[in-house]
Structure formats: C-alpha cells, structure tokens
Amino acid sequence: DQQVKQNSPSLSVQEGRISILNCDYTNSMFDYFLWYKKYPAEGPTFLISISSIKDKNEDGRFTVFLNKSAKHLSLHIVPSQPGDSAVYFCAASAFTDSWGKLQFGAGTQVVVTP
Amino acid sequence: NAGVMQNPRHLVRRRGQEARLRCSPMKGHSHVYWYRQLPEEGLKFMVYLQKENIIDESGMPKERFSAEFPKEGPSILRIQQVVRGDSAAYFCASSPGGTGESYEQYFGPGTRLTVT
C-alpha cells in the first residue's frame, strides 16, 4: 500500500535552471511532509519540511509547496547545481499514526548537467 | 548525517546466522527509528523506539526480527536466522522528540547487509 508516490523516477536539468520534483499522497491524515536527499552509499539528508497548516516553506534554494486539496507537494530547487545530483525522497507522517513513522516515496533521481 | 552513528557499515552473513546492527542517536535525541531499503526501492519503516520502549513496530516482520533501545548504549536491530531476502541497506534515524521538529529525523550512513 504505497501512500506516498513519486511518479517520476528520474529528472535531468541544466545547471542554473529550476528543478521541480513532485510527490502525491493518498492518506488525508498526513500532516507533516519532508524532503530528503540521498547520495549513493550514504544515509538520507534532511532538506526541508512543511506542516499541513502551511502551503509554502522556503529555505535558501529550496522551496516546498503543498496543495492539500490535490494531495500534492512539490520541491523546487533554484538554481540547480551539480552537487544537487542525487536521489530525492518525499516523506510524510501522520500525528495520529505514531508521529515518527515516516512513509517514503520511491525517490526521483536528479541529474544536473553542465 | 555525521551525528547518527551506525556500525558496522557493511555486514556479511551466511544464511542461518544472526545479524546485529547498532545505532547511536544524535546527542540529545531520545527517539530512534529503523528503516530498510531494498534495491531500487524507497525506505520502509520498520520500528520506532524510545529509551526502553517500543512505540511502533508495525513495519517489523513478525518473525526473526527484534529491536531494542536500552537505557544505556546503542539501539540494536537483531535479525535471527538470516535469509537472502534480508539483504538490504538498514538505516537508523533519530529525532529529539516532542512536537513539530520531532518529525525531522536525521539519518545515519546505514548498514549494508549481505546474506550469502
């Protein structure tokens, strides 16, 4: 039962341009959403999060948008840099489901080209 | 990432042996989580622990798998009688607990288990 879905397995973007990663979810009880970046043979690194009471959160080059009615969130990276090449995971959590249980999407491989 | 320690980083076990994976949370964190990542898949939740308590083990296989987070020392994920299907990367994460930022979990580098 995949409650968090990342339908694009890969994304190629030119250096300096915007990367847009998408994530859909099915569980309306999710109230906190997170994005992680992962390099090969390393653990995921926390990037940015958003509570369900907000529709946007920004941190430097990273902005996350949440559309609750559509059960959709997106991560924007501007400008994209070569070091952003990694796998990006969307994750969600529900306060009613033992806070800490993160449900992850399958990930999107981002490649930033020169 | 550097704050959460996991060891060993790589573990090779023959079928039927036991695997013990260790996790030391970030300083000041009292909540520990274990996740498993199979090849070409996302991370799957296994278990959520606080000191001396299992809060949620809904993602743990019913047999052969157990986890603990004792009052002193690291959290341990134990897999008894390993099978080839247990080969995966096992990640530990920690968080400070409380509300709001408690959702932000910080991950260790993982233990890559290979069962031969």
Image (cartoon, coloured by chain):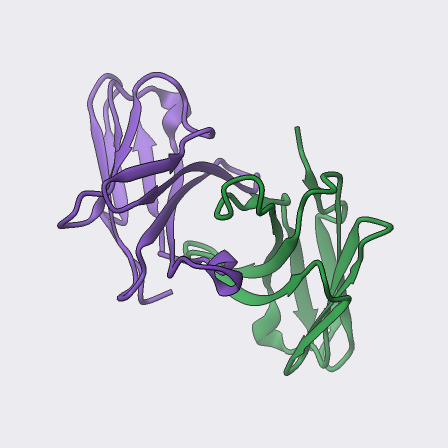
Chain colours: A green, B purple
Q: Residue at x 23, y 17 (%)?
A: B16
Looking at the picture, does residue B106 appear above or below residue B31? below
Indicate the position of residue A111 as horizontal and vertical percent values. Answer: 66, 64
Q: Is residue A32 visible?
A: yes
Q: Residue at x 67, y 46 (%)?
A: A30
Q: Residue furthest right?
A: A69
Indicate the position of residue A50 as horizontal and vertical percent values. Answer: 65, 64
Image quarter in which the C terminus of chain A is found? bottom right
Asked if residue B98 lies left or right of residue B42, the reply is left
Indicate the position of residue B57 as horizontal and vertical percent values. Answer: 41, 31
Q: Nearer the viewer, residue A16 or B50?
A: B50
Give the number of callouts.
0
Image quarter in which the N terminus of chain A is found? top right
Q: Residue furthest left?
A: B72
Q: Nearer the viewer, residue B23 or B48?
A: B48
Q: Nearer the viewer, residue B112 or A6?
A: A6
Asked if residue B40 lies left or right of residue A3, the reply is left
Q: Residue at x 31, y 27 (%)?
A: B115
Q: Residue at x 62, y 49 (%)?
A: A92
